[in-house]
Amino acid sequence: MASETIPQPPGGAINIAPFKTDVHPVWCPGCGDFGVLTCIYRMLATKQLSPENIVIVSGIGCSSRLPAYVNAYGFHTVHGRVLPVATGVKTANPNLEVIAVGGDGDAYSIGAGHIPHAARRNIDVCYIVMDNEVYGLTKGQGSATAPVEMVKGTTPFGQLDDPLNPIAMAIAYDISFVARGYSGKPKELTELITQGVDHKGFALLEVISPCTTFHDTYKPVSQRIRFVDASHDPTDRLAAMKLALEKETIPIGVIYKNQRTSFSERIKTTQERSQAKGTPDFNKLLESFQ
Amino acid sequence: MMKDVVFRVGGEGGEGVISCGEILTLACARMGNEIYTFRSYPAEIKGGYAMYQLRTSTEILLSQGSSVDVQVCFNQEAYDRSIKDVRKEGGVVIYDSSSCTPSGTLPTHAYGVPASDLARLELRNYLTKNIIFLGVLSKLFGIDYPILETIIKQKLGKKGEAILNLNFQALKKGYQYVEQNIPKKDLYFVEKVPVQEQRVILSGNQALALGAIAAGCKFYAGYPITPATDIMELLARELPKQGGAVVQAEDEIAALSMVLGAAYTGAKAMTASSGPGISLMAELIGLAGMAELPAVIVDCQRAGPSTGMPTKTEQSDLNHAFYAGHGEAPRIVMALSSVEDAFYGIIRAFNFAVRCQVPVIVLSDQYLAQRTATIRRPDPSKLVIEERTKPTASDCENYKRFRLTESGVSPMAVPGEKGGVFTATGIEHDEGCELSYEPENHWRMTEKRFKKLQLVLKSPDIYRRHGVNDQEIGIIGWGSSEGVIREALSKANDRGIKVAAFHPRLLNPMLPEIGVFIRSCKKVIVPELNFTGQFAREIRARFGVDVVCFNKLAGLPFTPDEILKKIEEVHEQIVHHV
């Protein structure tokens, strides 16, 4: 899907202009999602993808507005259904580069039931979750990743539920590419997004993307992050789980990886198997009901 | 000799009642007869009362019949439950005399066959009981013996020589028992007739699935649910051959989400479910309306609400089909009226979906989904298949996905097409997909989305009219009751009652012809298998006229006699100016 239409400046610099639209983002100043958006532009420009061959699917929430800001096909769907919609897009047309985006509410609350099944199918989709631990569009209630005891509008005496560990969950579900990024580390994030998109199979990219308005975590996050050691073997599931369960620091990088058959490949095999018995003939099919 | 015979087989679920009925059906069809089956069975795989009904005739059949001519009882429960339905004058009951004692008023002919004992003691296999009964039916009613053997071989051949031979013995055992012990006194007989035209034997669900393939469906996502699952099973075998895909989703929300994702790429896509699943899809029906995506959603209705009675029929999802979802989202609602209409109706549904870029909800029901009938073999070369309106080169110069047009339909670009790049969204938007909360825009775009529905109103085959032209009484039914209504109507016409039926296959948008029909009648009966008269309420609201509701809520279809009785009752009222 390399494009001839997108000119790139010489000398290794990349031109992200062809992927921008003139729609102004609704995000608040300082929102982590701006950083994620820029990284997506850079990944698209670097990979020289053609806008018409890219589909960005999203759910509902601040971050789910993202498709409108990228010059590509987009589908801004309903709350929580980004993964099944993306599954439909990719399965119906496997030639498309399908990227799913959304927030932690979309991914880990209302849409969480779809994650294990996207993992089982190993859909060839990169899912970028912009996690800010709150519901931004409804003014800052705690989400599934919010710390317990956090006081917000709907939890005036403290959040009642413990937070979910998305990385541990992803490894438990055996998602074939699991990484954590941070909107404050754009260079590394662009690299992770690129790897996630290149991965043949389901990639879950948990991105810490702080909300400056309702839950500003830039400072504590910046203090606690660390890059995953070069010695870490992401194909070692137990080592990955150990990293996922780490409490003191927040590991950034590729945590877990396994290469296995993607859903698109399985669909193709199914088609080949069924076609091995001869070309489809509707009249013959009708005959079998006589 | 009576050549129009209603057979019913009843017994314990799991003892071969259904397969006995299926083999009998296939045999009658291969003998050149018309068939019309009716199934009712427990939701559990084993246990509980199960029954299978088959009507067969050399003439065209419109309904399952009003009473049973030949009842086969595998056990006492089957006898006790069904004896009241058997025709008293000339009717036949065949019962397992080793497990069943006849009581009460018997029909004219009662034949006892010790089938359980024959199976257990002579064949040493209780499971051969159903085949013994087939042998009995073969001898009594002329069901072609070699045809039965061929079907049994096709059905059981895979289980090995020993099992097959055992079943052949069972067939013979039943046949010989009648030969040696039962003198035939009844008048029923299934004739072997030459087949006039090429026909296929299909269930409603099979006809629907084949129609979807013929319409060009390339993507199906669904979640198993009674009584819709066999649509998915057939498509799972066939769609991959056509380069398509079938995905078993994690729930019905995911199923419709996947279908909308596929539709967004330009693939013809469908899901099928029943009430509980369709309830879950409500929000996505709104998204399909808002993002103007063509999608076909089949609802094989079953008795609700909640889990209701999963294996029993009902027509109670009409409200949901019309209004599911918040806000005001356009959708087309159609109802399938027969096995043949399931094939052609689903093709119409796909055509309407792509023509108007809207979700099309197709109402079937358990009664139609799971009954089999013989239909004329469709000719694929004669089908009209529509495709989406694609953007032209000039459309792409400044592409507006939701451009306002006279018909309301805007050219639809899909991913992969240059110049068509846009972001579809469920948020209110303007012609060019920019989000907009402007009051004029919301009004204008809503109007655009609803305007498209008018495009289907002049289509062929979206309603049927039956009966006399100078009617006093009108019947407006919908869905699977068309044949039953026609049969009742013809009996009423024979008795001199001027009655006609208008049977819409398109329910929403509502056909103006319904109003014209109502105004030409003195009284209009609306028969529905629901409690509250859902379609009657729509008719009253749309045309401001009253109708006579005729509701049945038994988990069972109407019989022609029930409709006939209602026609006569209304006729009396007209005659006596009540």
Image (spheres, coloured by chain):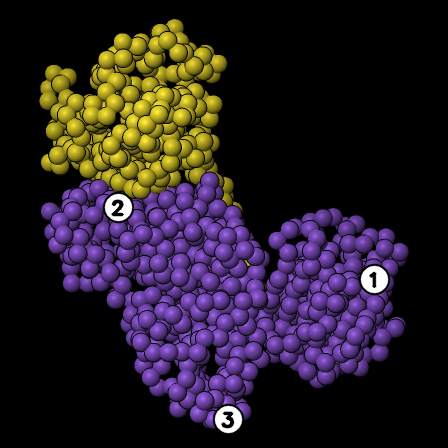
Q: Is residue B136 left or right of residue B271?
A: right
**Among the two numbered marks 3 and 1 on one chain, the one whose residue lies closer to the N terminus:** 1
Residue type highlighted by circle 1: Ser
Q: Residues within 10 Å of mark 1 (few under 14, many from 20)?
A: some
Residue visible at 78% across and 59% down? Answer: B129
Compute the Cα span from label 2 to label 1.
62 Å
Q: Are marks 2 and 3 in contact (CB under 8 Å)?
A: no
Reply above or below: A218 against B500.
Answer: above
Location of residue A57 (image quadrant): top left
Taking depth in this image into account, of B399 and A112 the one nearest to the observer is A112
Location of residue B553 (image quadrant): bottom right
Q: Is residue B366 visible?
A: no
Compute the Cα span from label 2 to label 3.
56 Å
Identify the residue position indicated by label 1 in the image: B99
Q: x and y percent of residue B216 in the render?
A: 38, 55
Taking depth in this image into account, of B331 and B192 the one nearest to the observer is B331
Q: Secondary structure at mark 3?
A: loop
Residue visible at 58% across and 70% down? Answer: B36
Compute the Cα span from label 3 to label 1.
47 Å
Q: Mark 2 falls within which chain?
A: B
- Which quadrant of the figure contains the N terminus of chain B? bottom right
Q: Mark 1 falls within which chain?
A: B
Name the colour assigned to chain B in the rendering: purple
Q: Which mark is residue B496?
A: 3
Q: x and y percent of residue B446 in the render?
A: 21, 56
Q: Which chain is yellow?
A: A
Residue type highlighted by circle 3: Gly
